Structures are given as structure tokens and as C-alpha cells.
Image (tube, helix red, strand yellow):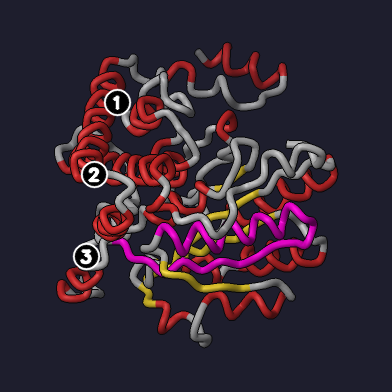
Amino acid sequence: MSLESASRESVLETTTLVAGDTELARDALHTMWRIRRFEEAVDDLFARGLMHGTMHLSIGQEAVPTGACLALTDDDLITSTHRGHGHCIAKGADLTRMMAELLAKETGYCRGRGGSMHIADVATGNLGANGIVGGGIPIAAGAALAQQMRGTANVVVSFFGDGATNEGAFHEGLNLAAVWDLPVVFICENNKYGMSMSTSRSMNVARVSDRAAAYGMPGVTVDGNSVQEVYDAVAAAVVRARAGAGPTLVEAETYRYKGHSKSDQNLYRTREEIDAWRERDPITRFIDEIRAAGSLTDADTDSIAAAARDEIRAAIAAANEAPPSRSDELLSGVFRSADDAAEVEVSR
């Protein structure tokens, strides 16, 4: 997006009531249900031994990617994390290609080679998930620098978890972005645990957003289970970034219902804690807001949920029919010199 067209393609006004706008409410609810059903399907496939490797589910965190990406245009970019299925879906990724990637199929986004933690979809502005904690933060800063140098009005959003805020990449990325006034929005999905380490034990400040002051950028903490609060904060940060005023750190407080990964036995938290957060479920909450606003009927919301379920089922069926990733093509995406290629041919 060019600077000239920025005014025409700007994000929605931050005063927009998402649940009160029929189309926005429909889109947001559809996105959240697509994320929830995708994650539940992946959980089931792993449990039945039909999917391999590992996975990190974000069930319970759907409002963060939904609200954040609602504030973006198609030309804006994101970097994701190892817990990144929701980011991919909210930014417009194809469900079948995502499922094919996790099932190690040739038709997957990375031809079945990247798996759950490495999906990228440049066509929709997703510069990729990352298996390295905090790895997407400097990538986002670099992408934002590229947009600044090209004179575009595009903004980059970097998603990361609370654990990443204790990594060097977090401090280096935020400092660089602040010094150069880069058009990037840093979004911390604070789900209270970096693997099994509680945030109360891993940092000596009350909020992750408090750390923004060290870099001279705004920092704000919002309820990450509220689509509206996430949208408002990110939309304001995006407007600021487009205007050339630099980055913002947004902390979205949320919670994952499942363990860190499929091998996590959840020994570090109680059932009561998990149940208490389930009472604050972002999808249930958003449906209540829609009902109060009167933008959609109960029949509409039920239909949206059913449509998301059917889309996931269709994605699984199509992905299962796709050819498996080919082992003899494993090195085809790796840069090699002519001598290296000849050596590989000889070894065959």
C-alpha cells in the first residue's frame, strides 16, 4: 500500500463497535470458530496418531489474532510463533493447505516439510511462524524497515508469547524499532506461562507492557479475551505506525486451555485455574456481545459455527487425499552449489 493510498485504505476507526456491526461481527465470529475448530481437529488427529511431530494449541486465545488482524489491511504483514495456527487463519490462510502441511502432504504450504511450527503464506502477508522463541520479532523489525525504506504505508505486526519477552531478540528488536521509528506493532499474547514458567516468577514488573517505557514507545495492556479491546488497541497502534510515529507494544492478557504442547501434562497449574479461565471464553463472550447488540440472530451465530465446522471437515478430507511429501525431493528447496548438487547425484 502506498503512502498516497493510505488514507483510502486506512484501518477502521477505533470507535467501531465490532459486535454491533453485522459484517464485522460475522467475520470476527467466523474467524474465531475457524481457529477453534481447526485447533480441536489438530488435537484429535494427534491423539489418534494420524498426525506426527508436535503442535502447540491456542484454544482459548482466539480473540487476539482475530481482533488484531481485523485492524489490518491485506497489504500489511505479520510474523507468527510456534503457537501460530490462529495467526495464519486470521490473516487469511487456506485451511486445506494448512491441514496438508501438518499432515506432511506435498500440497501443504511448505510441501509438508515445515509442519505446525513453520507455516508461512507470503500471499496473505504472513512472513512465517517460527520455532525459535522470539524469533519473529527481529524479522518483523527488518520487514518494517523494508517498508519504511520503500516508502509504503504498510505495517508489520509481530505476535509472540510472554516467554519471548525474556529473550534477547525481544529487547534488540524493540530497541531498534524505537530508534528508527519503524512501522511495527509488537503484540505479546500473555497466556501466563512460558512453557511451565509463570510470568509472576519470570519478570519483576507487573505487566509486560511496562517494558515499553525502556524503549521510549507506548505500551498498553488489554483483555486478550475481548475482540473489541484487542481491536481498539491494535487499530490505534496501526494508525500511529502508518503516520510514521513508530512502534507500540500491546500486551493481550489471555489463556491457553491446553498444555504447552502435546506432551505437557499440566502439572504446574490447577484444574480450578483452567476452569476459571474457561468461564471467560472469548467466543462465548463475543456471542453474548453480539446478542446484546442485536447485530446477528442466534440462528446466524449457530450457522456461522456450523459453517466453520464443515470447512474444517472439508479441509481434513481434502488434505488426506493429497500426495505425501516426497523424501526424494527433500533437498529441492535448499540452496546448493553446482558441486554440491553433483555430489548428491553421485551418492544416489
Vertical arrangement, residue 269 with respect to residue 113, above or below: below
154 drawn magenta = no
Q: Badge 3, how many Cα within 10 Å: few under 14, some, many 20+?
A: some
Mark seen at residue 315: 1
Front position among marks 2 and 1: 2
Left or right placement of residue 150 versus residue 281 in this view? right
Q: For residue 9, which quarter of the picture? A: top right
What separation in Å lies between label 2 and label 1 (alpha carbons)? Answer: 27 Å
What separation in Å lies between label 1 and label 3 (alpha carbons)? Answer: 27 Å
The part of the chain drawn in magenta is: 227-256
The x and y percentages for residue 265 are: 20, 63
SS category of the residue bearing label 1: helix
Mark seen at residue 235: none
Front position among marks 1 and 3: 3
**Labels 2 & 1 near each other (Cβ < 8 A):** no
Q: Nearer the viewer, residue 167 or 34?
A: 34
**Labels 3 & 2 near each other (Cβ < 8 A):** no
Residue 133 showing in the rendered view: no
The x and y percentages for residue 89 are: 42, 39
Mark seen at residue 278: 3
Vertical arrangement, residue 285 with respect to residue 271, above or below: above
> Which residue is painted at 73% across and 49% down in the image?
144
Type of the residue with mark 2: Thr
Vertical arrangement, residue 132 with respect to residue 47, above or below: below
| Sequence-wise first label, 3 or 2 | 3
Residue tagged by mark 2?
297
